[in-house]
Image (cartoon, helix red, strand yellow):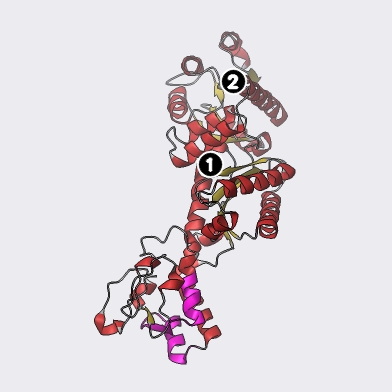
Amino acid sequence: MYRVLIVEDELFVRLGIKMSVEWEKLDMEVIADVSNGEQAWEVYVREEPDIILTDLKMPIMDGMELIRRVREKSDRTRIIILSCLEEFALVRESISMDVTDYILKLTMTREDMEKVLDKARTELEALKRAREPAGVSPEKQRQELLDFFYYNTWGEREYGERLRKIGLPFGEKNLLMAELEINRYEEVQKRFGDDYGVLVDSALLNVLTELMEEHGGGMVMKDRQKCYLIIAGYGSAEQKAMAEYGFERFLAKARKTLSMYFQIAVTIGISQLFDGYENLGRMYQQCRYCLDQTFYHMPGENLFYSKIRGEDRTALVRERLLACAEQDGMDDHSKKTAGGSRGTVRTKAGSGCAEKISGIYAESGSGTHGLRQPEKICHGGGERAADGACGNAFPASGGILFLSQAAFRGRPHETGDEQNRGGNRLPY
């Protein structure tokens, strides 16, 4: 959205402009309204608004001095003069400093104001097109985005400007992002006979890119091992809910295609909806956060940031344990322990419940928030699992799996011989 600063010493005029214009319809927002040029200059230096609506005669610093300072710094900012009839000589002088237009305060209507603002927006769009470098390749666009996500060297606002100049294949309105993580990626590599993942990446990127081209208004790129980013803009959607619905349908189609043709299951982290390229970095962090939480969820789910950011993880662990208990016939005492906040849960190694709990680790991927990984677990004095798979860390018989009350609070433990009875505690 284009950002607007209102500068007017008459309070009622200032508030009238701010309240009467339908800013969202014009793809604009008011970032500040101030009463003199000095305050306006402070806001400008800090925020660099796209459009300034300014009076000419004001205390401390007048509008003419403000315009001179702005033009020394930037020729892009659009300036609209709020004028009185007796200020015509000043208006004529200001026109020489590349102002967009002027409007008479005494006779202006909402329609007049919106017409002038629309003219300013048209000029900004023309400047944007004129400054866009021609022929920026899709690979260069992807690299610019990844630099933003990984390093954010320039800051969000500056990157937003840089991304506007390279002609991304999606607009800035109603942006959504998802990151697909391939479950059991090593098994997929073995099936492809692809030790380095080159064939897997090429095949999946081609399929996802074709799906996005059919869908329109988006981009697909490789993020890191076993992860693929999808970005889409739904500028034509009249309501945000329609944009979210369209994106979910696309992800469902992508999931179905990968399952049908490649026998691949994916877990998907999905960001909130934003407007503006400068928010893409924040959206990326939301997707990564969602995938970091796969430790607490079943593999193959859609994980929405808006739904999981405030989850009670202790409750999620209890829920999973109780579900295992119901399926495997755990005794009543252990069920109560799993559902409570004290005591120790004991499950026979090799049982379905133990395998499901180990599956949490096997599918957890990254992001266990400082918890010890499953390859560090030993049971019954046996040797450590060499392949790091949690399921293989369980002994064939005789071992006991322990989850203490402190484990529910997410703290790793050292072995306690008085409670261990032949097996180390499992960190959760």
Q: Which residue is mark 1?
A: 279
**What residue sits 45% from the left and 57% below the top?**
366
Asked if residue 322 can be seen in this view, the reply is no
Q: What amino acid type is highlighted by mark number 2?
A: Arg
The image shows residue 68 at horizontal and vertical percentages of 48, 14
84 or 6, which is in the foreground? 6
Give the magenta range.
330-359
Is residue 344 highlighted in magenta? yes
Q: What amino acid type is highlighted by mark number 1?
A: Asn
Q: Quadrant of the C terminus?
A: bottom left
Q: Image height check: is 146 above or below 100? A: below
Callout 1 crowding tier (Cα within 10 Å): few <14, some 14–19, many ≥20: some
**What residue sits 48% from the left and 37% below the top?**
148
Q: Quadrant of the N terminus?
A: top right
The image shows residue 220 at horizontal and vertical percentages of 61, 43
Secondary-structure class at tag 2: helix
Which residue is most to the front?
193
When asked about the image quadrant of residue 261, the answer is bottom right
Which residue is most to the left?
417
Q: Which residue is mark 2?
A: 131
The image shows residue 381 at horizontal and vertical percentages of 30, 78
**What residue sits 55% from the left and 65% below the top?**
299
Asked if residue 142 can be seen in this view, the reply is yes
7 or 153, which is in the foreground? 153
Q: Of callouts 1 and 2, which one flags the residue occurring earlier in the amino acid sequence?
A: 2
253 or 405, which is in the foreground? 253
Measure how far apart labels 1 and 2 are at the Cα level: 22 Å
